[in-house]
Image (cartoon, helix red, strand yellow):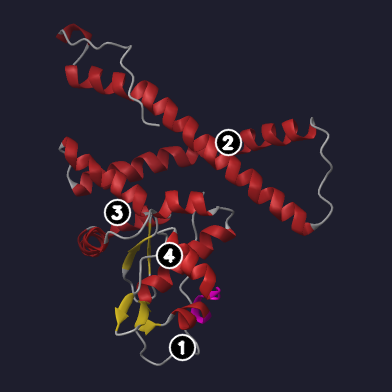
């Protein structure tokens, strides 16, 4: 699924403003202060900066809220959104990620374009590269622990996403059809309003995303270790053995 993002309309906001109170942020992004604080409590939104007794949010908070809203419109619940965007709070880590993206945009624009095509990063109206799915980026960058540098790790991420893109459509459609068929077999009444159709579509999408994500994870965990061991050993005759009973519990 491609994640689409939009830049908020700043019409009517304070000229040249770079900071917002919670009420001003709420008006800017079209969300109640209560919901903003709830997202902050879930660590979906980084805490504001306090100046005296007043807490201020900035343009980064606006972009984050717009990203959350965009994912909600596409059917993701808050648990799924947290999995996509990651929890906030480690500002130094986020700053490093942002700085890395800016360098990447200058030195490797084609790679940024590929990541953008899959909804991993995006660009603001002024051309700044920003993170859309930090968890995906960080998972690729963690390959550095295995000796893979930044650019190759992100190239591998885009190649994997390119491959999955061709497989996902058929898998999602066939799985969705199977789920709908199973639902009809329960005798549940059909939706009677567009609102109900909307709600049922969101529920089905969220459930399917969760199941397919975990199924793919299980499959990779089952086969990844053996494949890596074979390739690193240079073949079965290299004298490298592995106890297949050793399982890695990743939750």
Residue on which disc 1 sits: 13
How far apart, in angstroms, are the residues tagged by discs 3 and 2? Answer: 26 Å
Task: Label 2, secondary structure: give it.
Answer: helix
Q: Which mark is residue 205?
A: none
Residue on which disc 2 sits: 170
Q: Residue at x 56, y 34 (%)?
A: 171
Residue on which disc 4 sits: 40
State left or right for residue 109 relative to residue 120: left
Q: Residue at x 83, y 44 (%)?
A: 190
First in sequence, mark 3 or 2: give its number. 3
Q: Are marks 1 and 4 in contact (CB under 8 Å)?
A: no
Q: Residue furthest bottom?
A: 15
State left or right for residue 199 relative to residue 8: right
Q: Nearer the viewer, mark 1 or mark 4?
A: 4
How far apart, in angstroms, are the residues tagged by discs 3 and 1? Answer: 34 Å
Q: Nearer the viewer, mark 3 or mark 1?
A: 1
The magenta segment = 27-32
Pinpoint residue 1: horizontal percent, then vertical percent. 52, 49
Front residue of 152/201: it is 201
First in sequence, mark 4 or 2: give its number. 4
Q: Counting other residues with Cα less than 10 Å from the Cα at mark 1, is it few (<14), some (14-19), or many (20 or more)?
A: few
Front residue of 205/149: it is 205
């Amino acid at each position: 699924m491609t994640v689409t993002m939009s830049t908020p309309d700043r019409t009517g906001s304070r000229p040249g403003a770079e900071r917002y109170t919670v009420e001003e942020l709420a008006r800017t992004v079209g969300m109640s202060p209560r919901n903003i604080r709830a997202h902050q409590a879930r660590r979906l939104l980084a805490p504001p900066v306090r100046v005296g007794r007043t807490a201020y949010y900035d343009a980064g908070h606006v972009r984050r809220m717009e990203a959350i809203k965009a994912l909600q419109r596409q059917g993701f619940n808050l648990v799924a959104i947290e999995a996509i965007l990651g929890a906030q709070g480690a500002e130094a880590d986020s700053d490093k990620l942002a700085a890395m993206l800016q360098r990447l945009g200058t030195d490797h624009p084609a790679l940024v374009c590929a990541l953008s095509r899959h909804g991993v990063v995006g660009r603001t109206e002024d051309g700044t590269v920003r993170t859309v799915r930090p968890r995906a980026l960080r998972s690729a960058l963690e390959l550095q622990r295995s000796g893979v540098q930044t650019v190759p790790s992100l190239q591998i991420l885009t190649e994997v996403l390119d491959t999955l893109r061709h497989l996902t459509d058929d898998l999602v459609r066939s799985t969705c059809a199977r789920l709908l068929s199973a639902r009809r077999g329960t005798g549940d009444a059909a939706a009677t309003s567009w609102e109900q159709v909307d709600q049922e579509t969101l529920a089905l999408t969220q459930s399917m995303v969760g199941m397919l994500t975990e199924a793919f994870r299980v499959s990779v965990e089952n086969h990844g270790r053996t494949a890596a061991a074979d390739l690193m050993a240079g073949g079965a005759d290299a004298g490298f053995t592995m106890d297949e009973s050793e399982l890695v519990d990743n939750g």
